[in-house]
Image (cartoon, rainbow, N blue to C red):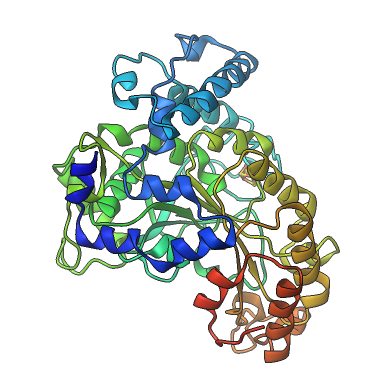
Amino acid sequence: MTSFFSTLNKEFRKFESLDTWKQLKEDGNSLPWYFAVSINRMPAKYLISKSISCSVTDLKLASEQELWEEYLKLMGIFLDKWKAVRSGEVDIISEMAGQKTSLMDLNVELVNRMLTHCNFCRWNCQIDRSVEIAAGAGQTKKHGTCQLESTSKVSSYFHHRGEEIVFRGIMGSGTIFFTSCNMRCSFCQNGDISTDKDNGIIITPNMLALMIWQLRMEGCHNTNWVGGDPTIHLHTIVQAISMLDSFKVSNPNNEDLNYIEAVKADNYGRYSTWHTNSEYAFYQKQVFNSPQLWNSNFFMSKEAMYILRSLMDAWLPDFKFGPGKCALDLSRTPWYWDTVTNNLKLIHEWDEDFVIRHLIMPNHVDCCTKPVLDWIAKNMPEVPINIMDQYYPDNLCDPMSTKYRERYSEIARSPTKDEIVRSYQYAKDLNLNFETLSLEKSVFGMKP
Ligand code: SF4
């Protein structure tokens, strides 16, 4: 093990020695699991899921109820094994060998069943998304809030250099932007992709896996699932993750690679800017390894949360609105507060690594920022937070745009200096763990 780390590429060594890790440790939460997977000291959770044997041999024949019962049984085994992996008691690679049906396969089957009565997110539309209807033939087909059927589209993928330092590191976060969303944020800063389900290219799970492979081989510190929102593409994502351990050092499929590179936003000629290096991407030099990061609005169903529990190595939930009517008024989203706080409580109870993001919005410090920070202080004060001051009016809130709607005039400006400083000061008074990640990213450089 030691000799392997001594050969680590210098970019990964720089990532490993960032001051931020020391600072976060002093703050009381340094995302230890995510960090260890990121530098390939530990195997990503999807590899652990692959090492757990499923006793239902023919998944297609079992009822969904039976599959969930099996899931609950295997989750107990998963948690014991995850603990053993962390303490170095298990050789995960030998345990993966020879598994016929695994917890990973069970996850794939479960999301495919969920797709037939879609309950990926809190809307719980119960629409059958499993059958794709040809253009012009399906006018009578019902769609859910996300407007999607089974096809997933990716708008772009690239080394994201603007995420929090723990995620962007030195080489960037391996970000994959999906189209469409299950919320309707009037101020969305990715409105071009979140409100246009046809933006981007159609991708198969195999192509998606190839994007992950490419980004990680080029040095990205993680796979960053985002959109719109990734939850509405859960079936494609889980299936792609299930394929990752089959990727080898050599380029798996040139035809698919040529296709997906049409949306690789930082490509200027193949590998002309990024060079692949297997030292970035393999656990014990044998099996493809990339930490999975769920970057989401967290408006997910409990079932989606359960599936992701055995696959995500870190989480990056947004927590935007207070408990009043703001989520409904600004994002047309009911049940927001209960859904997001319940999901945050789950990952906290599960002892997962996560960073909460909160965006300071103009005229919403008292109704949103303060209750959000109060709730965090009461329920999970040690969790790192990025309190963002980068809001600017976009989408339906941009007075310069033809899409502008007068009813959003209250948020048609950037937050003032006073609003930003008041928010930071409030977090400081609550003794929250926010300064390490927020101030490093602060656009205006204001401090509490
Ligand atoms: S993902 Fe959410 S919004 Fe889309 S159909 Fe499923 S439950 Fe409805």
Residue 399 visible to the viewer? yes
Q: Would you place residue 99 above or below residue 36 in this image?
A: above
**Toward the viewer: 39 or 69?**
39
* Residue 421 located left or right of residue 110: right
Snapshot quadrant of residue 16:
bottom left
Q: Residue at x 59, y 45 (%)?
A: 139
Q: Residue at x 60, y 33 (%)?
A: 306
* Residue 311 located left or right of residue 139: left
Which quadrant would the N terminus be assigned to in this image?
A: top left
Q: Position of residue 353 (x, y in %)?
A: 54, 48
Classify the position of ligand 1 by quadrant: top left, top right, bottom left or bottom right: top right
Snapshot quadrant of residue 434:
bottom right
Q: Residue at x 50, y 66 (%)?
A: 23
Q: Position of residue 264 (x, y in %)?
A: 30, 61
Q: Would you place residue 426 above or below residue 176 in this image?
A: below
* Residue 56 located left or right of residue 142: left
